[in-house]
Amino acid sequence: MVVGRAGDGHLVAELAGVTASDRVLDIGCGPGTAARIAAATGATVTGIDPSQPMLDAARLLTRVRPPEGSIEWLQAGCEEIPSDDNTYSVCWSLASVHHWPDLDAGLREVRRVVKPGGTFIALEKRSPPDADGLASHGWTADQAERFALMLPDFGFADAQVQNHVRGRRKTVTVSARLHN
């Protein structure tokens, strides 16, 4: 299934204040919807995903409608991001942190590749505490709060948890800035 919600991409691009001067990393980019939204500002974007079929979809959709900025698509997971230290001013992960096999390793890599003062945003579907099956595919309020409380251990400050409602879609973001 190819998932890519433009509303989520616009939300994180707005929260991060993405501009043409930014370098953006989209972890778990899927079909590249959020990456293309960032690139439309003129930003330089890297989208990573462990799934080759998702990257194939991202490349195809980008060829159909090329954005203003540049996008590089790389097959990788969050535990080994193929980028130099201090590369990105903005890093986000939409509906994928709950898939990360090793949360600590993923956050260490985010810390490594984000520039001091850079922004990290995780967006997940908001799930009720008693959800099971597909309905549990996201974060409960408690899980989002626990994730935010982890971020200072990885050098991030000013973590904020925000709930968002767009139509019937309910999401939660956790955002923070890397210490200078």
Image (spheres, rainbow, N blue to C red):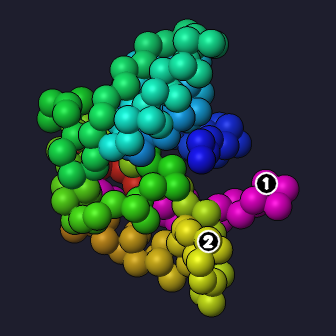
Q: Which mark is residue 99?
A: none
Q: Amino acid at mark 2?
A: Leu
Query: Between 49 and 92, which is closer to the camera in this rendering?
Result: 49
Task: Provide the residue designation for mark 1.
Answer: 166
Rendered position, 32 above or below 21? below
Q: Which mark is residue 134?
A: 2
Which mark is in front, 2 or 1?
2
Q: Residue at x 20, y 31 (%)?
A: 83
Q: Position of residue 116 (x, y in %)?
A: 24, 41
Q: Amino acid at mark 1?
A: Arg
Q: How many marks?
A: 2
Q: Position of residue 45 (x, y in %)?
A: 41, 24
Magenta segment, which residues? 154-175
- Residue 113 belongs to magenta span: no
Q: Is any part of residue 18 visible from this angle?
A: no
Q: Of marks 2 and 1, which one's residue comes earlier in the chain?
A: 2
Q: Which element is circle 2 on?
A: helix
Q: Residues within 10 Å of mark 2 (few under 14, many from 20)?
A: few
Query: Between 149 and 98, which is closer to the camera in this rendering?
Result: 98
